Image (cartoon, rainbow, N blue to C red):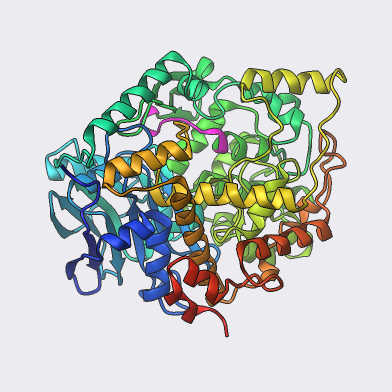
């Protein structure tokens, strides 16, 4: 009988070279589960108020959840967190892959990285032991070059690593942490924090069996899920196409797919981005022990483009951000840009939306060819989009300014540039339109990490559960055969649904469980009970998510964020040019009232949005009240 956690958090001080192990106790892991909660606890207790996100006082936390490492679909995600250099607030990002399973099987539940190394280093963890090693020979290398050199140096091609490329080293504020070459902790700039600490990679190799207290139950659930995937009753389209791998036309017809920096509502060229697997796909892959296998692998060679299948293929968010949001309809070009971003460790959402921002500034005369080093940076110019990915990753020319994020770039460019900056709290909007999915208007606004689809489930309720039915219905509506979808109000019922969806989503970010296999809350409770031996129910798991949200909010309030930061970008308050949302702007006052209703329903101060000491005490984290603004 083996529990699915070890009660061991590895603590690594890069300034002193000291490595130690914390054992916080079973209650800690039951209260927090992992992920966001471990990150928020560490940031509140250990990172001083006002600390520079790229300075030595910030801490970088790698935090899998209590289910991670079990051989069951979805249980290999992990969270990476720190004070964000992009938003100045709570920073966390989640990713799949293989590293976190190896970390758990090496005997550790999480890693806290402190201080700054005087030279580039990597952390090597194997079966209960850890050491800091020199990485000077790896600095400046792409992620692929780095991983190949690590495999040679460690004489083991079964190692797995979370690492950065040149974009992280150069502290691009939306740099990501890569798990291998295909999976990214994309949001909030965690790669920049890793680069600031001169930490090139964290490498793990674990051989310990991790079966859970009730191993038979875990195996039964794993087999059932795998069988349902094969039968097509669980995650069928994801298994076949991945995210965004099939028809995207419905997203245009509904108004969900962003076009030309969220400005436009029509994109006749959408067929160029659809059915990627039929065009350049060579197979599907998956994360460790997952039957869904939703990861596309693509290959293409064309003139100056060389799409390397080692970097996988673009997910929906990437197809949208580097494709339609930049007006680009060439899936090979988008895949080439995806390769560059993964090689340099850049968030594809942040990169694409930042380039789209620059494109709109260029088309409105705020940037010139002199500013762009001769690039004709117009919507639809695929070559210019790819060139800007390189410039951002290398911090060259205009790329150096864009690497600083929206607020710095808009201020430097001046004029109306701020109107074209589509972000919340400094973080780019993902490829889900809050003017259509009204729950996301609230979710994006109040999210402690800025706009992030992984922290607010898509509660639209506008589409059939069957993707083909969804597309067919969208086409029928566009032909006038069905009535257009009325845009939903932001009343109390929508607020209540948003809260539930957010808590469920953040719960997954604490368990660090993937949403793709479609596990229900009761199934997850059954899984946690079998893994840990605790008698856990769905209500307790939702409270785990609520606890994380309150701790993250408390951290943000301590760092000076206020109700004024809970807002959408200017663009969201107006309609699109044509298309389904041509009269679909968010009403400012309705959203503001919904946000205050959200505060009240969360048990926070209804006017300021500050969590109350009573709410924190109710959630078992009363100690955090000392960090609330006085």
Task: Compare residues 430 and 542 and report the one nearer the observer.
Answer: 542
Residue 569's place in the image compared with 484, above or below, is: below
Q: Quadrant of the C terminus?
A: bottom right
The reply to whether residue 400 is in sight is yes
Residue name at image x 78 percent, y 61 percent: 593
Q: Does 612 sit left or right of 462 as displayed?
A: left
Q: Looking at the picture, how far across and down is residue 49, in whole percent?
A: 47, 79
* Vertical relation: 173 (above or below) 578: below
Bounds of the magenta segment: 309-317
In the picture, residue 431 is in which quadrant? top right
Q: Residue furthest bottom?
A: 630
Query: Residue 464's x, y, as percent?
Result: 67, 25
Horizontal relation, residue 342 to residue 556: left or right: left
**In the image, is residue 560 part of the stretch drawn in magenta?**
no
Task: Check the image and name the residue furthest to the front.
Answer: 535
Between 7 and 40, the residue placed more toward the observer is 7
Q: Is residue 591 above or below residue 530?
A: below
Depth check: give the residue in front, 172 or 473. 473
Q: Is residue 498 left or right of residue 289?
A: right
Q: Position of residue 71 (x, y in %)?
A: 27, 33
Task: Please count the marks in the image.
Answer: 0
Q: Is residue 311 magenta?
A: yes
């Amino acid at each position: 009988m083996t529990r699915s956690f070890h009660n061991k958090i590895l603590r690594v001080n890069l300034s002193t070279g000291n490595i130690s192990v914390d054992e916080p106790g079973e209650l800690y892991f039951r209260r927090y589960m992992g992920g966001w909660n471990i990150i928020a606890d560490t940031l509140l207790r250990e990172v001083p108020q006002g600390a520079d996100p790229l300075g030595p006082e910030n801490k970088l936390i790698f935090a899998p959840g209590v289910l991670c490492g079990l051989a069951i679909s979805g249980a290999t995600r992990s969270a990476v967190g720190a004070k964000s250099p992009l938003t100045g607030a709570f920073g966390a990002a989640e990713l799949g892959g293989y590293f976190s399973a190896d970390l758990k099987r090496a005997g550790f539940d999480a890693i806290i990285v402190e201080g700054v190394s005087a030279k580039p280093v990597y952390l090597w963890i194997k079966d209960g032991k850890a050491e800091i090693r020199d990485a000077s020979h790896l600095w400046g290398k792409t992620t692929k070059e780095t991983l190949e050199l690590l495999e040679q140096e460690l004489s083991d091609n079964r190692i797995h690593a979370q690492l950065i490329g040149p974009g992280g080293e150069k502290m691009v504020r939306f740099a990501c942490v890569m798990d291998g070459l295909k999976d990214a902790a994309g949001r909030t700039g965690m790669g920049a924090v890793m680069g600031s600490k001169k930490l090139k990679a964290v490498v793990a190799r674990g051989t310990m069996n991790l079966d859970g207290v009730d191993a038979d139950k875990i195996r039964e659930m794993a087999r059932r899920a795998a069988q349902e995937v094969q039968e097509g009753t669980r995650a069928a389209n994801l298994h076949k196409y991945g995210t965004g791998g099939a028809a995207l036309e419905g997203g245009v017809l509904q108004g969900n797919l962003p076009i030309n920096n969220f400005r436009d509502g029509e994109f006749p060229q959408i067929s160029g981005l659809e059915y990627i697997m039929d065009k350049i796909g060579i197979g599907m892959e998956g994360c460790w022990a997952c039957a869904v296998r939703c990861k596309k692998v693509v290959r293409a060679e064309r003139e100056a483009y060389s799409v390397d299948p080692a970097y996988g293929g673009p997910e929906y968010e990437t197809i949208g951000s580097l494709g339609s949001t930049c007006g680009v309809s060439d899936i090979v070009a988008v895949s080439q840009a995806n390769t560059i971003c993964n090689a340099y460790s850049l968030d594809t959402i942040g990169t694409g939306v930042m380039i789209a921002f620059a494109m709109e500034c260029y088309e409105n005369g705020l940037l010139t060819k002199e500013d762009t080093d001769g690039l004709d940076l117009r919507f639809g110019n695929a070559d210019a989009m790819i060139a800007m990915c390189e410039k951002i990753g290398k911090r060259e020319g205009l790329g150096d300014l864009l690497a600083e994020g929206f607020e710095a770039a808009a201020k430097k460019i001046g004029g109306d540039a701020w109107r074209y900056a589509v972000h919340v709290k400094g973080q780019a909007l993902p490829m889900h339109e809050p003017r259509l999915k009204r729950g996301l208007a609230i979710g994006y606004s109040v999210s402690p990490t800025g706009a992030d689809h992984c922290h607010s489930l898509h509660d639209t309720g506008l589409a059939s559960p069957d993707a083909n039915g969804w597309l067919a219905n969208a086409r029928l509506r566009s032909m006038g055969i069905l009535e257009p979808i009325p845009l939903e109000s932001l009343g109390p019922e929508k607020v209540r649904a948003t809260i539930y969806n957010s808590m469920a989503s953040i719960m997954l970010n604490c368990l660090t469980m993937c949403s793709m296999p479609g596990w229900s809350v009761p199934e997850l409770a059954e899984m946690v009970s079998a893994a840990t031996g605790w008698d856990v129910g769905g209500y307790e798991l939702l409270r785990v998510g609520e606890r994380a949200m309150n701790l993250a909010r408390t951290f943000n309030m301590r760092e000076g964020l206020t109700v004024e930061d809970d807002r959408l970008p200017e663009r969201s308050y107006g309609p699109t040019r044509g298309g389904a949302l041509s009269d679909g702007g968010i009403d400012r006052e309705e959203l503001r009232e919904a946000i205050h209703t959200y505060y009240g329903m969360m048990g926070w101060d209804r006017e300021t949005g500050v969590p109350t000491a009573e709410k924190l005490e109710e959630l078992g984290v009363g100690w955090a009240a000392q960090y609330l603004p006085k």
